Image (spheres, rainbow, N blue to C red):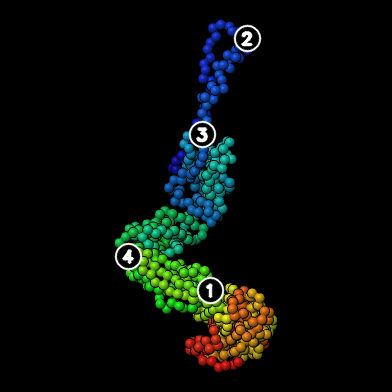
C-alpha cells in the first residue's frame, strides 16, 4: 500500500483581548461609563498584539514513490504520464510547503472520469482506455488559494489490458564516449500501444559505464585505452524482453602531434562544395582528437570545427590544428576562388545541379541520372538546374562546360530526331538564354563513352538581357540551368546521365580535364 503524505490542518488563532475585565464592586452608573471602561480595557493595540498571521502554501508537489516513478514517461507534448491498467488503483502522496502552512485542505479532480477517477484521499482508479486517451488528475489548495496557480497534476493513461513489449531498440547520438562523458539514451518500444513506456537499465561493466534510471549513460575513467561495454534495457512488464547496445569507452589521451595531409596545401575548392573534411594524423594515434584546437585565419572565407571546413565565402584561408598540451601545430592553405564551379557528383548527399519542376533525378554510382517528363503527347522535357545561388566570375573562370548524354544520339533508334538545350539564367542584371537560346554552345565534344561536353564562353557569349558578363567582378545567379526540352517524336520518359558541370580558365583546361578522365573526343562543333 502506498501511504499518502498530507499536511495537517492547523486552526487559525483568533484575536483576543489581553486586559481582564474586573468585577465591579460598586454600581458606577451610566452606560456611557461602562462603554468607556470597555474601550479602555481593550484597545486597538490589544486586539492586534496577540494575532498570528496565516501561513500560506508556496508550493504543492507530488512525492512520487519509487514504484510509481519507474512507470512515468514523458509524452510528445512534454507531459509526464502515468500508465495504469483498467481497475488498478494507486495513491499519490503530495507535499505542501512550508510544513507550517495554516490552510492545508486540498481538492482532487479528474478532467476525464471516463478514463480515470480520483477521490479526495488521492486514490486514482483506472476506469477504461485503449492506451491513447488520458485523464489529467490534479490536486489544488481549496478556498481562497484555489486560484493561486499552486497545484500538481499528472496525465493518467489507461489500458484495458496489459500489452507487453515485443522489441526494444536503444537509440543514441553516439556509440563512443570518453571517460567522464555522459549520453542520453532513448528507447523505442514496440508495439506502439505497449502499456509501459519505460525500462530498467543495466550495464555489463559498471567500472566502464553506468546508466541511471532515466537513461543517462556515464562513461567511467579507467585504465583501459578503449573498451566495449554493453547497455541493456529490460521491459518492466514482466515479459523479459530486452534491447542492447554496445558502446566503446575511451580514455582521454592528450594529442602530442598533429599533421594535416599535405595534399590540401594550396588546393583549390569550389564554393558550391560547401564542406571539406580534412584528413590528418596524430601522435599518439589513439589520442583524444576532440582536444585538438582548430582555427581559421578568415571565418568570412571558411570556418572549421573538428577538422571539418565549411566554406562561407571566396578567397584564401589558412586552417590550423594545434595540440593544446604541446603547442605543436599543422596548417594548410585553401583557396576558394570567385567563379570556380565544380559539380562532379562525387557525394550522393551533396550536389547542387539536379532536376526541376516535373522532372526527376537519381544519383547513380558517381553520376546523376535525369528522368524526363511529358510536355505533351509527343514531347519530353528534363531540365538540369542549380538548387543554390551560383557565383560566376568571367574574369577568373570564363569557360563553363557540362558533360552529359545527348538524347538525340542515345535514342536515335527510338525515333528521337530533335532536342533543344539552352543555357539559361537569372542573376544580378543578367537573364534569359545565352547567345540566342537553343543549342548555342561554343563547342560540342563527343567523348569516347558516348557522352558530350557542351562548352560556353562567358566573355564572348551574350545573355538575352544584360549582355556579356563583366570580368572584374562576380555575378550571383539564383537560377542557372540547362533547359533540356522539345525532345520530339517519342511519348514516354527518357533518361540521360550527367557527369559534371564545371568552370575552367581556358578551353585547353577543358581538353586536359577530359583526357584526365581517360576519354578521347571528336569535335562536333
Query: Looking at the image, is mark 3 or mark 1 earlier in the sequence?
Result: 3
Q: Is residue 356 left or right of residue 58?
A: right
Instruction: Name the one closer to the observer, 350 or 490.
Output: 350
Is there CB contact under 8 Å for labels 2 and 3? Answer: no
Q: Nearer the viewer, residue 70 or 247?
A: 247
Q: Which mark is residue 225?
A: 4
Comes first in the chain, label 2 or label 3: 2
Q: Are marks 2 and 4 in contact (CB under 8 Å)?
A: no
Between the residue at mark 2 and the residue at mark 4, the CA separation in whole angstroms equals 102 Å
Q: Nearer the viewer, mark 1 or mark 4?
A: 1
Which badge, 2 or 4, comes first in the chain's sequence? 2
- Residue for badge 1: 314
- What kind of element bears circle 3? loop
- Of marks 3 and 4, which one's residue comes earlier in the chain? 3
Q: Which residue is mark 2?
A: 30
Residue at 51% over, 60% down: 192
Residue 330 is situated, as x and y percent measured from the top left of the image, at: 39, 72
Q: Nearer the viewer, residue 381 or 491?
A: 381
Q: Mark number for residue 55?
A: 3
Going from N to C along the chain, the mark reached first, 2 or 1, is: 2
Q: Position of residue 127 (x, y in %)?
A: 54, 48
Amino acid at each position: 500500500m502506498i501511504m499518502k503524505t498530507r499536511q495537517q490542518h492547523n486552526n487559525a488563532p483568533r484575536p483576543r483581548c489581553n486586559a481582564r475585565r474586573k468585577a465591579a464592586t460598586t454600581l458606577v452608573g451610566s452606560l456611557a461609563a461602562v462603554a468607556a471602561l470597555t474601550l479602555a480595557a481593550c484597545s486597538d493595540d490589544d486586539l492586534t498584539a496577540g494575532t498570528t498571521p496565516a501561513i500560506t502554501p508556496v508550493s504543492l508537489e507530488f512525492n512520487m514513490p519509487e514504484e510509481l516513478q519507474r512507470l512515468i514517461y514523458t509524452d510528445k507534448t512534454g507531459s509526464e504520464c502515468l500508465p495504469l491498467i483498467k481497475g488498478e488503483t494507486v495513491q499519490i502522496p503530495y507535499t505542501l510547503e512550508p510544513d507550517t502552512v495554516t490552510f492545508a485542505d486540498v481538492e482532487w479532480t479528474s478532467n476525464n472520469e471516463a478514463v480515470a477517477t480520483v477521490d479526495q484521499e488521492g486514490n486514482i482508479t483506472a476506469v477504461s482506455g485503449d492506451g491513447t486517451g488520458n485523464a489529467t488528475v490534479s490536486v489544488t489548495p481549496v478556498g481562497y488559494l484555489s486560484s493561486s496557480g499552486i497545484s500538481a497534476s499528472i496525465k493518467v493513461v489507461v489500458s484495458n489490458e496489459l500489452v507487453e513489449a515485443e522489441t526494444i531498440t536503444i537509440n543514441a547520438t553516439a556509440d563512443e564516449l570518453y571517460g567522464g562523458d555522459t549520453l542520453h539514451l532513448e528507447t523505442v518500444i514496440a508495439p506502439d500501444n505497449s502499456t509501459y513506456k519505460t525500462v530498467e537499465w543495466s550495464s555489463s561493466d559498471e567500472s566502464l559505464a553506468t546508466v541511471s534510471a532515466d537513461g543517462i549513460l556515464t562513461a567511467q575513467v579507467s585504465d583501459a585505452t578503449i573498451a566495449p561495454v554493453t547497455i541493456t534495457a529490460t521491459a518492466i512488464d514482466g515479459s523479459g524482453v530486452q534491447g542492447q547496445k554496445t558502446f566503446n569507452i575511451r580514455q582521454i589521451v592528450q594529442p602530442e602531434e598533429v599533421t594535416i595531409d599535405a595534399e590540401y596545401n594550396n588546393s583549390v575548392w569550389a564554393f558550391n562544395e560547401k564542406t571539406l573534411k580534412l584528413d590528418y594524423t596524430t601522435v599518439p594515434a589513439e589520442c583524444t582528437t576532440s582536444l585538438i584546437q582548430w582555427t581559421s585565419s578568415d571565418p568570412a572565407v571558411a570556418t572549421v570545427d573538428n577538422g571539418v571546413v565549411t566554406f562561407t565565402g571566396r578567397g584564401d584561408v589558412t586552417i590550423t590544428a594545434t595540440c593544446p598540451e604541446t603547442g605543436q601545430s599543422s596548417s594548410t592553405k585553401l583557396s576558394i576562388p570567385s567563379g570556380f564551379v565544380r559539380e562532379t557528383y562525387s557525394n550522393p548527399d551533396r550536389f547542387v545541379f539536379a532536376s526541376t519542376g516535373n522532372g526527376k533525378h537519381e544519383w547513380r554510382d558517381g553520376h546523376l541520372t535525369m528522368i524526363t517528363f511529358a510536355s505533351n503527347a509527343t514531347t519530353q522535357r528534363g531540365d538540369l538546374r542549380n538548387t543554390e545561388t551560383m557565383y560566376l566570375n568571367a574574369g577568373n573562370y570564363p569557360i563553363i562546360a557540362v558533360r552529359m548524354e545527348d538524347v538525340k544520339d542515345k535514342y536515335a533508334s527510338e525515333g528521337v530526331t530533335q532536342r533543344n538545350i539552352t543555357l539559361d539564367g537569372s542573376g544580378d542584371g543578367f537573364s534569359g538564354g545565352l547567345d540566342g537560346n537553343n543549342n548555342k554552345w561554343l563547342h560540342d565534344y563527343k567523348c569516347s563513352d558516348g557522352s558530350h561536353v557542351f562548352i560556353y564562353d562567358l566573355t564572348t557569349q551574350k545573355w538575352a538581357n544584360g549582355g556579356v558578363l563583366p570580368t572584374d567582378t562576380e555575378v550571383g545567379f539564383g537560377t542557372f540551368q540547362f533547359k533540356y526540352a522539345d525532345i520530339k517524336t517519342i511519348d514516354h520518359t527518357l533518361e540521360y546521365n550527367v557527369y559534371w558541370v564545371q568552370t575552367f580558365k581556358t578551353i585547353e583546361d577543358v581538353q586536359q580535364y577530359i583526357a584526365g578522365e581517360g576519354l578521347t573526343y571528336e569535335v562536333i562543333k
